[in-house]
Amino acid sequence: MDKKSYPGVIDHWADETAAKIIREKGEKEQYTCASGITPSGTVHIGNFREIISVDLVVRALRDLGKQVRFIYSWDDYDVFRKVPKNMPKQDDLVKYLRFPITMVEDPWGRDASYARHHEVDVETMLPLVGIHPEYLYQAKNYRAAQYAAGIRKALEHRETLKSILDKFRDEEHKIQGEWWPISVFCDECNRDDTDIGGWDNEWAVSYHCNLCGHTETVDLRTAKGVKLGWRIDWPMRWEYEQVDFEPAGKDHHSQGGSFDTARHVCKEVYGWDAPVSFRYDFIGIKGSVGKISSSSGIVVDLKDLLRVYTPELVRFLFAGTRPNTEFTISFDLDVIKIYEDYDRTERIAWKINAAKDEAVYRKERRIYELSQVQGVPSVMPYQVPFRHLCSLIQVADGDIDKTIAGLTDITPEQVPGLQRRCQCAKYWVEKCAPEEFRFRLRPAGEKAAVSEAEAAAVRGIRDRVIAAIDAYPDDKSCAEAIYKVAEDHGMDGKVLFRAAYQALIGKDQGPRLANFLRSISRERLLGILAGY
């Protein structure tokens, strides 16, 4: 396939965003693109949409020859507010409510903390889909007093911040009484149920813990427990990291939402123009109710997705959909169509299929490029339609090596990619596919309960069609021979098909019969039907 030969041409929404970043932020030695999440529970596929959206824009910028820093912030110094329903050891976790997440124990006992467990789960999976950000850990940064100057600036501009926050609130929800832009985790009991006692207009802040009674005055330059509120912390870090681009979810981008307030805080308090952004929408899972939520326990993560979709297909799902479009990820029969859509895009990109026009070709090729994990492969991948591959794997009794060995025209370079697709097809058939899609070939000699007339027709298929199966050049000629058997036996085609499926797999229906017979060895078919 040709290398991308349209530098600067807008072929994709990621290219549009890259051009906007350069236009609004000007030419720079390096652009910083950011993403992040609080590891309060399983990092689900809705969270992943932000990560991969940033990655796609990062790739678009780099394709234009720009230097890009891609940072991913783990907000692991946020408060542990609620125990998600899908977590083990619920009673143990409840004891850590109001702690910073980084200080909650790992209920699985695998990692140093609850937060780190979820971070590791993501950090080990992202490279599989070609995403390699620089990770920032906010617990580490806050506890090292890295943001002391930013915290002091917020204290100095306390009234301005209050005014900005109130601008987007109705009278009932405006800030009442004394207000501080910070909270403090108690140095004795680790919880954030504390009241700020005062600030000396320099570096000293005093607080009192309402739970354990501890009172202390701390120096912002050395204090470990002082933290900015979310709507101030976010823009403070935009300025600190010099962020040029960061998307946000539909809820954050709502009128008067956190992005609106953060934009004003960033400019008016920290003197930095807010990053270029766009809104990404929610993702549904076929058959689930409502949006995905870690706290509700309704969670599908990247690992779940990679069991059914290859890494390229995972990227394709997002690269082929504009971020502000809500869509559903399926684990049912729609999986077949999604693979078909990807294969069609791949054939257009490799010019195996002709596109409608040049614009369609460029768009499809760009989606394909951005769907690849490590760049476009050197040879066209071997395509087996996903539906057919599922049949081949079941014919091979789930043996992937045996499945691939039956394909005589595959090259060594194409094998790894097909192995991944086979693994996904096997998992989908065994764990996700509807029961009518699954089958098992009968062992040799096992007979179905069919009438004598049906048994005679099955013998006709065996002796006239299967005996000569290697002579049929395509499915159509094989199907014509099957219908000729039905005609000669004075039998309706549907009745014959039912008898054949019963004899082969013990079901009334199955894969398209002609194609099915041609995908099974002649010897095995004759062995299965020998008893008729």
Image: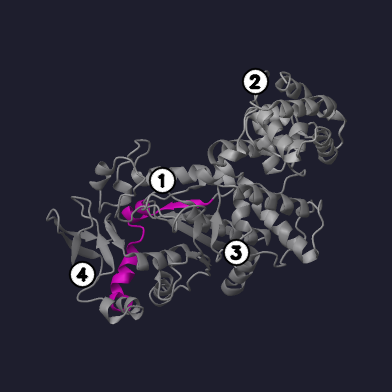
Is residue 466 toward the left or the right of residue 183 in the image?
right
Residue 511, image x, y percentages: 69, 38
Q: How far separated are the C-alphas under marks 4 and 3?
A: 49 Å
Q: Kindly report the distance in space between the C-alpha atoms of the residues bearing marks 2 and 1.
A: 50 Å
424 over 400 or under it: above or below: below
What residue would you read off at disc 2? 446
The residue lying toward the viewer, choosing from 312 and 513, is: 513
Residues marked 4 and 1 touching at CB (< 8 Å) = no
Q: How far apart are marks 4 and 1 (CA)?
A: 39 Å
Q: 10 Å neighbourhood of mark 3: few (<14), some, or many (≥20)?
A: some
Most common secondary structure along the magenta stretch? helix
Of callouts 2 and 3, which one flags the residue occurring earlier in the amino acid sequence?
3
- Label 1 crowding class (10 Å Cα cut-off): few <14, some 14-19, many 20+? some
Give the mark nearer the N terminus: 2 vs 1. 1
> Could you say whether the residue bearing mark 2 is in a helix, strand or loop?
loop
Residue 331: where, in percent of width, then height? 55, 47
Magenta stretch? 133-161
Q: What residue type is labelled 4?
A: Asp
Q: Write down the residue under mark 1.
A: 118
